[in-house]
């Protein structure tokens, strides 16, 4: 009985975080801000929601723990890959951005790629 | 878990999914669309476990785990494609 109440509270906390993650993805101004809101909030929300289900149903606790830890490990990796790819293909930063440390590093050089945002420059690279 | 509480929680989660879907539809670049889809997938994974709790059926846990694995592989593949092509 008491586990039902605790589990429902944890699930409600997690679902609120999920909604805030969706709101951040919808409202924030550029790819990197959206990625930050989307990854942190939805990872926390999914973790709390799934563990809350495990608290309400103690028989499922091990399975839910496996799913939650999997999300906790893989979600930041995919977000990092997306952010790195976005920076390399030259997606613009928001105009209010204060600092861009990645511009000074050699490994952040832009590349020519199929999904790029500056396709008109990469059409005929050999003729210029 | 009673019906009213479940409906309220699921509605809040689905509202988050719909917001991500709007971003996926109108995002200016391909990366924005990928971010929207990524958020949608994570929220859906959590909501699927919640649906399994309401319906008292543990098959939803397996479905949700497989969905999380496939989403991870898919997002990594999309990022790799954006960066240097397949």
Image: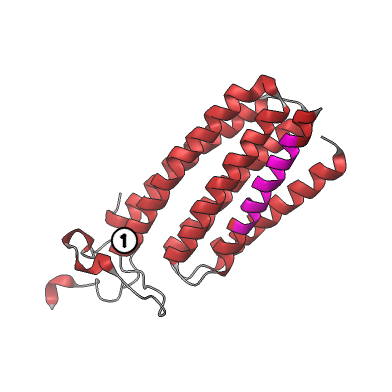
Nearest the eye: A51 or B66: A51
Residue drawn at 62 percent across, 58 percent down: A20
* Residue A9 point in image, percent of width and height: 73, 42
Q: Which residue is mark 1?
A: A114
Which residue: 13% across, 76% down? A127
Q: Main secondary structure of the magenta part?
A: helix
What SS does tag 1 mark? Answer: loop
Q: Which residues are magenta?
A: A6-20
Residue A48 lies, in percent from the top left, at 61, 41
Q: Chain of mark 1?
A: A
Residue at position x 27%, y 67% in the image: A101
Q: Is residue A45 above or below residue A21?
A: above
Q: Residue at x 66, y 38 (%)?
A: B48
- The answer to which quarter of the image holds residue B21 is bottom right
The colouring scheme, among rainbow, by chain, secondary structure or one colour, is secondary structure
- Where residue A64 sits, quadrant-wise, is top right
Q: Is residue A18 magenta?
A: yes
Residue B78 drawn in magenta:
no
Position of the C terminus of chain A, as image quadrant, is bottom left
- Nearest the eye: A38 or B82: A38
Q: How many marks?
A: 1
**Above or below for A116 versus A62:** below
Instruction: Give the farthest residue toward the front.
Output: A2
Q: Is residue B8 left or right of residue B23?
A: right
* Residue A116 against residue A94 in the figure, above or below: above
Which quarter of the rendered picture does the N terminus of chain A lie within?
Answer: top right
Circle 1: is it few (<14), some (14-19), or many (20+) Cα within 10 Å?
A: some
User: In the shown orientation, is residue A12 left or right of residue A125?
Assistant: right
């Amino acid at each position: 009985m008491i586990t039902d109440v605790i589990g429902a509270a944890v699930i409600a906390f997690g679902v609120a975080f999920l909604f805030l993650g969706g709101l951040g993805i919808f409202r924030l101004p550029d790819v990197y801000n959206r990625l930050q809101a989307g990854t942190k909030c939805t990872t926390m929300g999914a973790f709390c929601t799934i563990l809350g289900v495990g608290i309400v149903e103690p028989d499922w606790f091990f399975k839910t723990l496996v799913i939650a830890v999997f999300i906790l490990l893989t979600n930041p990796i995919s977000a990092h890959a997306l952010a790195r790819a976005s920076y390399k293909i030259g997606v613009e930063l928001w105009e209010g951005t204060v600092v861009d440390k990645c511009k000074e590093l050699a490994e952040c050089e832009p590349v020519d790629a199929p999904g790029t945002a500056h396709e008109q420059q990469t059409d005929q690279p050999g003729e210029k | 878990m009673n019906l009213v509480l479940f409906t309220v929680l699921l509605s809040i989660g689905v509202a988050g999914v719909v917001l991500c879907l709007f971003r996926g539809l109108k995002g200016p670049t391909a990366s924005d669309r990928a971010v929207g889809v990524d958020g949608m997938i994570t929220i859906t994974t959590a909501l699927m476990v919640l649906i399994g709790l309401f319906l008292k059926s543990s098959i939803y846990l397996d479905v949700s785990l497989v969905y999380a694995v496939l989403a991870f592989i898919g997002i990594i593949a999309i990022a790799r494609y954006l960066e240097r092509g397949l």
